[in-house]
Image (cartoon, grey):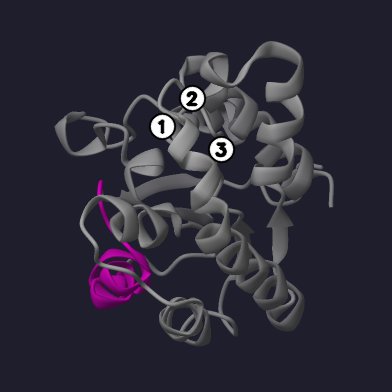
Amino acid sequence: MTALLDPRRTFVFAGDSVTDCGRRGDPAGLGDGYVKNLYDAFGSQRPRIVNAGISGHRAADLAARWQTDVIAEQPDLVSVLIGINDTWRRYDEDDPTSAEAFEHSYRELLDSVTHTAQLVLVEPFLLAVKEEQHLWREDLDPKIDVVRRLAAEYGALLVPADVEFNRQAAAVGATALADDGVHPTAAGHQLLADLWQRTVLSS
């Protein structure tokens, strides 16, 4: 379980606002979401943790800054959580990203680190707390399928966040985990951190 936890290693967490969580205003650079929860949980033998999330970003945005924000850190492990904005912008700004374009950008990310770092792919997730968010599934589900296929193809660990968030929401209510359906509450971030640990450190 602790084989990956070594202070000589570097873990980079890349993504959008779910990862960002105010990290650019945090002197420690961690933010106050699941990345910080993992940092605390890893304990004294924790690796060097880099939060490379930027709010609002889509897969193409992440690809554009990948060299400077991820590869330059010389990571031993790269965890990617991206995709919800690729869906959301279709509905709030009429600016869609096809599943094919999403996959193209995602492959750019993985191709550059697959031979040098352990890969962890986290499913983008959605809890339909608003009626119109049920419609988002037709756009998001194919992108989740892309992430699952790429995880298998690249030998990455897959963190089944969409599955687990929706399973837990059935018991505790969606707004307890993400009050707008997208951004986790404190409980949602803890769920994500716990799921990440179970998936990655127990593999």
* CB within 8 Å, label 1 to label 2: yes
The region drawn magenta spans 55-72
- Where 148 sits versus 190, above or below? below
Q: Quadrant of residue 98?
A: bottom left
Labels 1 and 3: the sequence-earlier one: 3
Circle 3 sits in a helix, a strand or a loop, which is it? loop
Circle 2 sits in a helix, a strand or a loop, which is it? loop
- The residue indicated by pointer 3 is 46
Relative side of 125 to 98, left or right? right
- The residue indicated by pointer 1 is 183
* CB within 8 Å, label 2 to label 3: no
- The residue indicated by pointer 2 is 178
Residue type for callout 3: Arg
Circle 1 sits in a helix, a strand or a loop, which is it? loop
Q: Which residue does the image show at 35% across and 55% down from the upper left? A: 85
Q: Which residue does the image show at 56% across and 79% down from the upper left? A: 116
Q: Which residue does the image show at 43% across and 53% down from the upper left? A: 84
